[in-house]
Amino acid sequence: MQVLHQDIMSRQHVLDNLTEKANTLSKQSPVAKVNKFVDEASTKYTKLCGQSKAMLERFEVAVKDHQQYQDAYQDCHDWLNSARDKVEACADTSGDRVSIQNKLDRLKVGTEIWIIDFILSVDNQNVKKKMLRARTILH
């Protein structure tokens, strides 16, 4: 999109040449149609430049939003993989009672750290506060 916008902006010299030739022509023989045509072309070009700039700004915002969504998706994907690993660790019930209790204790501590890390990774402060409040209520 930026290339198209730059292409549009680079055509200013064409309009300037047209305006210069129209001024020369109108000095030689004043014809209202020529001046009207040049004025309309200039107005349309100015409008096109403005629309192109606005569209470019919207696209830049969309690209930034897309990158943020992509980053959030990747964070969620990583979180989900980590959760799967923890579930797989829970599935292993081999060993005696003490070793199983040790695994459970490590899992509880790891899960608590994981939850806190996840809450702290949230950008929105209001959401973060609510998540921390909910965490303290549940414990």
Image: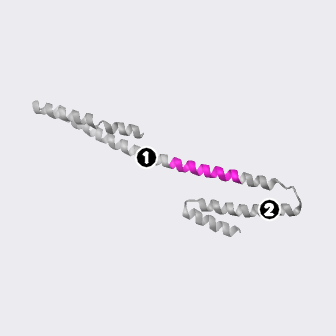
Boundaries of the magenta span: 65-82
**Mark 2 highlights which residue?**
104
Relative to residue 41, is residue 67 drawn left or right?
right
Image quadrant assignment for residue 20: top left
User: From the image, which quarter does the N terminus lie in?
Assistant: top left
From this viewpoint, is residue 31 visible? no
Q: Which comes before the other along the chain, label 1 or label 2? A: 1
What secondary structure is marked by label 2? helix
- Disc number lying in front (1 or 2): 2
Q: Residue drawn 53% across and 48% down? A: 67
Q: Residues within 10 Å of mark 1 (few under 14, many from 20)?
A: few
Q: Position of residue 93 (x, y in %)?
A: 85, 56
For the residue pair 57 and 113, the one nearer the viewer reads as: 113
For the residue pair 33 and 52, the one nearer the viewer reads as: 52
What secondary structure is marked by label 1? helix
Q: Residue drawn 57% across and 50% down? A: 71
For the residue pair 89 and 38, the one nearer the viewer reads as: 89
Q: Residue drawn 15% across and 35% down? A: 23
From this view, report whether residue 118 is shown above or below residue 39: below
Q: Residues within 10 Å of mark 2 (few under 14, many from 20)?
A: some
Relative to residue 137, is residue 122 drawn left or right?
left
Q: Position of residue 111 (x, y in %)?
A: 72, 61
Relative to residue 103, is residue 137 drawn left or right?
left
- Real-space CA distance between mark 1 and mark 2, rounded to the nearest whole angstrom: 51 Å
From this view, report whether residue 133 is shown above or below residue 88: below
Q: Residue reaching furthest right? A: 96
Question: Residue 58 shows which numbered tag?
Answer: 1
Task: Check contact, mark 1 vs mark 2: CB within 8 A.
Answer: no
Relative to residue 8, is residue 69 drawn left or right?
right
Q: Residue drawn 62% across and 64% down? A: 131
From this viewpoint, is residue 97 visible? yes
Q: Position of residue 107 (x, y in %)?
A: 76, 60
